[in-house]
Amino acid sequence: MHLELKLRKIGNSVGVVLPKEALAKLESNEGDTLILSDAPGGGYRVTPNKNDFAEQMAVAEDIAKRYRNTLRELAK
């Protein structure tokens, strides 16, 4: 899916309006929280905020920190 998003001024901030196709794919509605995280190769990834997402990210970051050298060697 390829969607073009428009940035709009909202007060002193800038917001993105998501079309209904994107909201359906994210299984999200108005008022829901989305997570914006770094994506491999640059850019960002948008995912719906599931209750366990923050916990999973904390575990992943802890593993990456503890096994940094091992992961670096495996990536070679």
Image (cartoon, grey):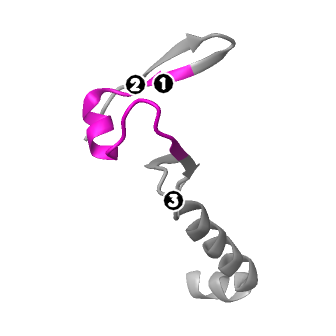
The residue pinned by badge 3 equals 51
* Residue 25 placement (x, y as % from top left): 28, 44
- Determine which residue is flagged by label 1: 16
Local crowd size for mark 1, using a 10 Å CA cut-off: few (<14), some (14–19), many (≥20): few
Q: Nearer the viewer, residue 46 or 4?
A: 46
In contact (CB < 8 Å): disc 1 and disc 3: no
Q: Give the residue displayed 60% in from the left and 19% down from the top.
A: 14
Q: Please indicate, yes or no, whether residue 76 appears anywhere in the rendered image.
A: no
What segment is highlighted magenta in the picture?
Answer: 15-35
Q: Earlier in the sequence, mark 2 or mark 3?
A: 2
The quadrant in which the N terminus is found is top left
N-term mark: 1 or 3: 1
Residue at 31% across, 31% down: 3
Which marked residue is nearer to the observer: mark 1 or mark 2? 1
Which amino acid, by three-letter code, is at mark 2?
Answer: Leu
Q: Amino acid at mark 3?
A: Asn
Q: How far apart, in angstroms, are the residues tagged by discs 1 and 3?
A: 23 Å
- The residue carrying mark 2 is 5
- Give the foreground label among 2 and 3: 3
Label 2 element class: loop
